[in-house]
Image (cartoon, rainbow, N blue to C red):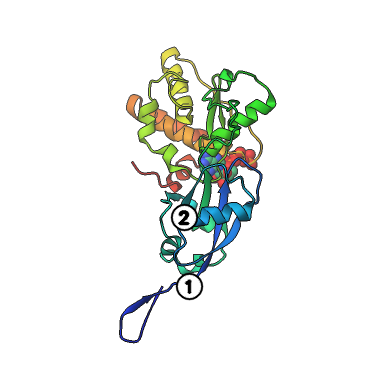
Amino acid sequence: MSTTDGVGVPKLDRNPRVVQIHPRVSQNTAAYCPLQISSGDTARTVIRNALVTLGLDDSRTYSLLEVRDSGQEERPLEPSDCLLERVRLWPPETQRWHPETQGYYFVLQQTDSGAPEDGDRIDDYDDLCSLQAVSEASILEALCQRFYRLKIYTYAGNILIAINPNKFLPVYYNPKYIKMYEKQPLGKLSPHIFAVADAAFRAMLDNQVNQCIVMHGDSGSGKTESSSYLIHCLTALSEKTCSVGLKRTILGAVPGATGLWQRKNVRE
Ligand SMILES: Nc1ncnc2c1ncn2[C@@H]1O[C@H](COP(=O)(O)OP(=O)(O)OP(=O)(O)O)[C@@H](O)[C@H]1O
């Protein structure tokens, strides 16, 4: 992305680019906005321009994340970071309009809760049973607030609610979490699908009784994906404690479970 000045000294390409800014905020707004960025525009400037373009509340606090590589890698930007410098490192075809699935865009993330500041703040509830007033509105609000902080799992007693983030969140599925949730009572740590797998696995071993995990949700809500995470966790647990035969039985429960997990490319 550089040119030369005729005497062999590379000249930086400082032409403006149009980038896509995707809001992740608690207010209703457009799915994304295109924004022109010029040389010298910092993350701070771009946040300000994006708030105006998207009509968002500028009394809230926001940060900017750079999303690369099919949307699987998110890098928080410092307010003083120069955006054009980041964009110039992207593949040329992503420096003009391209589908979101290709990655290479910016996320405008609201970093406060978005709740009213008059003392009526909605707290962060790991378990919906601890909500002070249980209503459809308070449940939805609590789930939304968690989702904005990328907390996709929430308990309702011993039921796990999973909200489909529609993109792989590596931070959740690092194999170290299988170890972390192992032998921990459900609800002791943050809500997680590995906690459910571990609870079922322990109950099976301790009580010598078959276990059943019921997955319920609309089409596209993430049942197949969640099954793959469950199976992955169960096989990892069975590798430690039980025979190869049990691992094969577990893998057989969901056709293609191994392939599904391997495609995620999770590394220790
Ligand atoms: N936890 C998750 N993390 C990342 N992506 C997810 C997650 N859950 C679901 N998805 C994505 O959402 C899409 C739909 O998920 P999935 O196929 O699991 O839904 P489903 O409930 O099984 O749908 P159906 O009932 O129609 O078969 C897939 O592209 C999947 O990768």
Q: Secondary structure at mark 2?
A: helix
Identify residue for label 2: 43
Compare residues 60 and 146 and report the one nearer the observer: 60
Q: Amino acid at mark 1?
A: Asn
Q: Secondary structure at mark 1?
A: loop
Q: What percent of the width, then of the height, locates residue 165?
A: 55, 42
Compare residues 56 and 109 and report the one nearer the observer: 56
Q: What percent of the width, then of the height, locates residue 103?
A: 50, 56
Q: Dividing the picture into quarters, in which one does residue 140 lie?
A: top right
Tell me, yes or no, if residue 255 can be seen here: no
Disc 1 or 2, which lies upstream in sequence?
Answer: 1
Compare residues 217 and 40 and report the one nearer the observer: 40
Q: Amino acid at mark 2?
A: Ala
Placement of the C terminus among the 4 image quadrants: top left
Q: What percent of the width, then of the height, locates residue 192?
A: 47, 29
Q: How many marks?
A: 2
Tell me, yes or no, if residue 137 can be seen here: yes
Relative to 89, is 229 above or below? Answer: above
Q: Residue furthest top?
A: 207
Q: Using the numbered discs, state the Cα–Cα distance from disc 1 to disc 2 in whole angstroms.
A: 17 Å
- What residue is drawn where x is 46% and y is 20%? 186
- What residue is drawn where x is 47% and y is 53%? 44
Placement of the N terminus among the 4 image quadrants: bottom left
Q: Residue furthest right?
A: 136
| Mark carried by residue 15 | 1
Q: What percent of the width, then of the height, locates residue 39?
A: 45, 67
- What residue is drawn where x is 36% and y is 28%? 180
